[in-house]
Amino acid sequence: VSLRILFWNCGVAPTRGKRKRGVEEVARIVDVAFKDGVTIVALCEVDGPAMSAIASRLTQGVACHIALTAPVATSRWDLGVFFRTGAIQCNAQPAALGKDHGKTIKAAHSVIVYDDLNRFRLYLLHWRSRLRGEREYRKNAAITLYRSVCDDLRQAVPIVILGDFNEEPHDPPLTELHASRDPVRVLKDADSFLYNPSWTLACPPHRDPWGSFGSFSYSEGRTSSAYLLDQALTSAHFLNEQARTAPTVRVPDFGVSHIGPSGNDHSPLELTLPWKTPTHSTTP
Amino acid sequence: MEDSNPFNDAIAEALQRSANHQAALELAAQLTQKLAAAVKKQTNGVVRVSLVTEARALTLGDVLVNFGIQKTLQVGKDKEDQQVRQYVIASAERENRALWALTFDDEGYPVTIRGPEEAVSITCFTEDDLRDAFITAARHGRVGRKIAALVRGVEESSAREQPTLGTGATASTEADGAAVSRDASVEEGPSSQ
């Protein structure tokens, strides 16, 4: 009845800077996620060799993978997808690209995810770091991605976006994407608004003001100790007001806290989508 | 005395945005005309290229979609609304091909080119980016295949008519002449057949 997708900036092969962990550690986490029932694991800060190396270390036959790591302009994509063998199919799609004064904007890569009853376009993204500014770049990436999303919505293609936006839910690039925390609002303009269930993770839990929050821990400077940089957005196709169902998110551990650096690191973000199965089909 | 009408500034801003939008439209039209000239030259005038609005493009498919004439005023249905999404199309005799689609921002830029492959898009934030994207799109093999198919269609059509008419050369010349006489149009595009 549901489909679980994990997104994780695993830091195994960043395009800039040092890696945070090795393929063995990442493979262990991916394997744990699949054993826990996750169907898709999307990674960022990977390259082609890292994807292959992780795949070779997973429990045999558990998952197929697609590396979205092709070079573009002077850089490369750093994304990849593992998906549970036999559960769903994934096909790589063209990326959404922009050009600003000749510089390439890597807005998002995507795959089509489908089975016999369900089909959606999964956009994956990793926008440039806010540690280096780049706000204009991220804003233009949002504009570029939104153009592509609007084309999909015009053609009634359900959308899921997962990524390291390097922005929080209230920041302008997310508003540019018409990403709302309110499912009722999204249903009112289903052809132009996206639902952002990630808002619930943007602050400490209401029962524990000292509890952890966000998806990125940050230990430097006189600034917040955590940020919600990794988020999930969906189109209204996954909202059902009558059934009171909607996508949900959480930040599972899966053992990541034992292998990563103590600060300045991303946690995985898990999105759970309502999913049709044959027993729930309305087809006569 | 201070102007207290807030709509003066609002309308001034709207007109400036309109001017920016118009500039982007005009650049797309200029680029389309240059593309049309190159296609015309290399297909001996058989294939025409034009920029048409989405509503117009929808009437040019194999199945004619009759939108009719808008008899009542309706927000979102005016000519200016239709200009936001346009198509670069190639045409010959009774056939049309969509080469790529353009989406304009209300302030002109960014302009998004979708195509020549389905689901491939590039969003251009400056004039130079748009020029480069047009040239890149025009270079695509899918564009070449569509233009070649249109030329082939006209040739086959002419060949079929030859035995019946017994004046193949004349028929072919007429067909070519009809295409040549219709230069690349930007506003209207070819009429639906």
Image (cartoon, coloured by chain):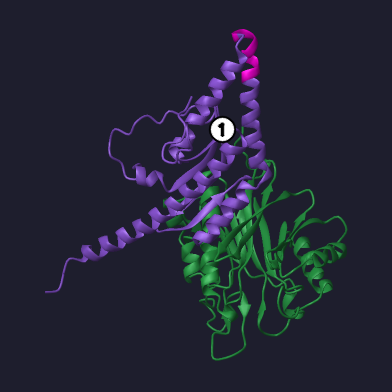
Q: Nearer the viewer, residue B61 or A122?
A: B61
Residue at 44% across / 41% down in the picture?
Answer: B186
Residue sitting at x 52%, y 46%: B34
Which secondary structure class fits the magenta region best?
Answer: helix
- Residue A265 drawn at (x, y percent): 67, 79
Q: Nearer the viewer, residue B112 or A115?
A: B112
Which span is picked out in magenta? B158-165
SS label for mark 1 = loop
Query: Quick check: can you spot residue A178?
Result: yes
Was residue A224 drawn as part of the magenta stretch in this picture?
Answer: no
Q: Residue furthest left?
A: B1
Q: Nearer the viewer, residue B152 or B16?
A: B152
The reply to whether residue A235 is visible in this rendering is no
| Residue A243 spot, x, y in % from top left | 51, 49
Quarter placement of the C terminus of chain A: top right
Alpha-carbon neighbours of circle 1 within 10 Å: few (<14), some, or many (≥20)? Answer: many
Name the colour assigned to chain A in the rendering: green
Chain letter of the purple region: B
Q: Residue furthest bottom?
A: A222
Residue plotted at (61% across, 69% down): A127
- Position of residue A66 relative to residue A281, above or below, is below
Residue matched to label 1: B45
- Is residue B159 one of those drawn in magenta? yes
The chain holding disc 1 is B
Q: Amino acid at mark 1?
A: Gly
| Rendering coords of residue B134 (x, y %) | 57, 51
In this rendered view, identify the residue nearer to me: A159 or A140.
A140
